[in-house]
Amino acid sequence: MNKRLDILILYVLLIFLIGIMNLYSASYNFSGNYIMRQVIWFLISLLVASGVSFIGIRRILSLGLVFYITSLLLLIIVLILPAEGAHRWIKFGFLNIQPSQIMKFTLPVFLVSVFYYSNFETLSSFIMPLFFTLFGAILIAKEPDLGGSLMLFPSVVTFFILKKAKFRKALPWIIAALMTVPILYLNFKPYQKNRILTFMNPQLDPLGAGYTLIQSKIAVGSGNILGKGWLNGAQGQLRFLPESHTDFVFPVFAEEWGFIGVIALLGLYLLMLRRMHSIASRKKDGASGILLNLFLVTISVQIIVNIGMTIGIFPIVGLPLPFFSYGGSDLIVTVVMIALFLRDE
Amino acid sequence: MFSKIYKTSLAISLVLIILRVFYFQVIKGDYYREMSLNNYLRVLPLGGYRGNILDRYGRELAGNRLSFSIQVLPDRIKNRNEIFEIINREFDIDIEDLKNIYKLKFKAPFAPLTLVSDVDFEKALFLKEKYRNISGLLVSENIKRYYPNSTVASHLLGYLGEISEDELKELKSYGYRFSSYIGKSGVEKEFEPYLKGSDGGMLVKVDNQGRIVEVLSREEPKRGLDIYLTIDLDLQQRAEELLSPYTGCFLAMDVDSGEVITAVSSPNFDPNLFISSDNYKISQLLSSKERPLLNRAIQGEYPLGSVFKLLIAVAALEDDVINPEDRFFCPGHFNYGGRSYKCWKSSGHDWQDLRQAIAHSCNIYFYNTGLKTGINSIAYHAGLFGFGQKTGVDLPYEKDGFLPSPDWKAKKVKERWYPGDTINVSIGQGYLLVSPMQVLRFIAALANEGTLLKPKVCNSISGELAYKREAENLLFSVKNIKFIKRAMRDTVNSPTGTGQIAKVAPAIAGKTGTAQATSGKPHAWFAGFAPYDSPRIAFLAFIEHGGGGGYATARIAKEFLKYYYKKSGL
């Protein structure tokens, strides 16, 4: 296991440390030691990552089908298991794993390993990858976890682009898929519809679904240029902001560190993504290069969409901010992805 | 190709995010900071409470008591129907009514709204415990105005009401807020700035459930200043009893100082009602035909009738147009300019001099005297005694009555002044309108032989003497006034006087009056002073449509004076 001591490690550690500091503030008034647990998750993710890294990208790619089927089984199990509210977690004592997050990792692996040699010139070569992606996405949407479900699509689209797919062939399919959107919309849960409607106009329901977005904007906006200082963000500290330790950690950060802090954080994320992009581009082996690019896009989209939803650019879909949001599964999956960037093959 | 797409999309996304965050944090930053402060900073008012209103001996006329009410915080309500159902169950108030009250009283999402007021202490404690988990529902305790003697001196005290939007606009900087109570009439209004006290408050940090996380600062509320009135509660109560069957007023004033010792207007009302927010009863009170809220003593404007003859006498003597010994013959009627004017006694009074004419209230004598004196002199002298002007009593909404003159008639009625008008004015009829308070101080000025006093109801404010004697010496011939006083004594004490019913020892002096009302029975007046030998108080009894001869009014005055004498050891 010849690992590269890359500057990427520094970026990730820096972001993670800032994330921990922010999480400390976001969960300051909560019972339960989120920092301790997040650090334990990080240590576990390092263990898992070194395991995966030891296996190596090529061998992982050969396991694509196994990964995919395992993930599907987990998704089905989570739907069957009794749960209060959403069926998102499989509980092992204090370790709760979220199969939808695992799918975020296994689907790209599966796509690359199975469809790498497709020509993407016939219709069927489009249909199969899309079908497997949709299947996973529907299972995740059933939990319900709209964010987790939508996060599968950047991978498959990126895969097509990287494989220089002839999109003209797929055009009728894309149109057909777009036409199903209204039908899908009708099948959304009322709260999901609400979120989309209130995304378009938060004032529709200021105490319900719009509340989160309004509070989030207040948190971000009230940070002004310099911020209120660490542990001094009233919106987060006084619980006006729901989910301030998971999906809505960014507003906590923006409130306490202001515009300067936000620019710094985005800069760090940008440095991290640039480094990942250059590593992925330099891969000689085509398949592993594609896989890393799929991971890169997945992480990028997650950062953009998470921040975007807290400031009203995207609907609120429920996605964690990498290295910032509390949650083990996402952390493990992200760290494992990064680890594969560091593996020199 | 992929690299290009990726880099471009990432760049666009980041720029969008940065622009959006820049917009929120830099351009609209102050707006959101303000929103954030509003989110978590609350000012909880701690209501100040009003000073007491006391009688001249410090007995409580208006005070404060603890009161409980059921309130809701609109922006904290999770389930409005649940709250309505609870109140419906506990207080048996119709849900539709509750919805209406809510709609009617709603002012702002954060302003507490009272659904049930004046909840009994035990019940309040019970509900506080039972429903403490219902979001948006609260049992609040506050200090409320309380009038221990209910209707006694109600017009003088006035009443409180919720501040109107116009008043709030004007008074906001003085610490008034939504649902503040403010004096609407009487002493409560006149002395509002002293009585009010000041609200304190707590600046608190709250979490998203509205729970107090931290008290940032606290200012204690302050009680307003106490107002000591010139009123004697015993006398006031006695007068209220005596007047209660009638519509009218009874006043008594210290003839040296102008202190109002008794001021009753009937019918009266219970000012506690306005605190109860019993809107039905309040609107009943407001729309009652008897106009119980009208303070007849200063807001009523009536023809004065024969009491005005005293003024004619003063004017005639001062002008020297008659001698007290001059006599006029009264055959029961008086012909002038082709019209016949009657005396109240149709058989006539025979020959009358001034003293007899006052005691017997002979109209014919005063028709003659009035014509001799002339309207200009009558108006001049009436003006000196303050007719047609506000008395300046320290109470709001006083009316000024009306003193007619040839100029006024030419301008407004576009007619010249006829001698018939003078004849009417000579017996207090015609265009002349007076308020009872004006008559009272006129009588007091006779009693003290020439000092016109400004009536006062406030004696001191929190022990600091607020009362200042304000008086004007009228420089009348004391001889003339003494003569009129003697005639007034005869009115009560001579066997033929019209005010004999009021005869009481020590002797008093007075004058009856019957004033033709525009409709219904005539108004009855009886005004005078006591004791005759060394006058201490002037008094006035007035009954709307009380009938002729002033019997009822004279009887009230007598009963009052008996009590007054007994109380003052005379």
Image: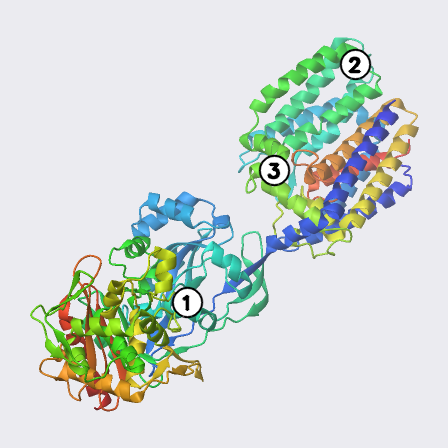
Does residue A7 appear left or right of residue B262 in this picture?
right
- Asked if disc 2 and disc 1 are in contact, CB closer than 8 Å, the reply is no
Mark 2 or mark 1, whichever is nearer to me: 1
**Front position in the image: A239 or B377:** B377
Q: Is residue B110 above or below residue B359?
A: above
What is the chain identity of the residue bearing mark 3? A
Q: Position of residue A266 (x, y in %)?
A: 81, 42
Give the residue number, with chain letter if any, for mark 3: A202
From the image, which quarter does the C terminus of chain A lie in?
A: top right
What is the chain identity of the residue bearing mark 2? A
N-terminal of the two: label 3 or label 2? 2
Give the residue number, with chain letter if any, for mark 1: B189
Badge 2 marks a residue whose secondary structure is helix
The amino acid on which the numbered mark 1 sits, given as a three-letter code, is Lys
Q: CA distance from mark 3 to mark 2?
A: 37 Å
- Asked if disc 3 and disc 2 are in contact, CB closer than 8 Å, the reply is no
The amino acid on which the numbered mark 3 sits, given as a three-letter code, is Pro
Q: Position of residue A204 (x, y in %)?
A: 56, 36
Same chain? Circles 3 and 1: no
Q: Residue furthest front?
A: B337
Q: Position of residue B468 (x, y in %)?
A: 43, 82
How many residues crowd mark 1 within 10 Å: few (<14), some (14–19), many (20+)? many
Give the residue number, with chain letter if any, for mark 2: A167
Same chain? Circles 3 and 2: yes
Does residue B287 appear left or right of residue B204 in this picture?
left
**Front position in the image: B512 or B182:** B512
What is the chain identity of the residue bearing mark 1? B
The amino acid on which the numbered mark 2 sits, given as a three-letter code, is Phe
Does residue B42 appear left or right of residue A36 in this picture?
left
Mark 3 or mark 1, whichever is nearer to me: 1
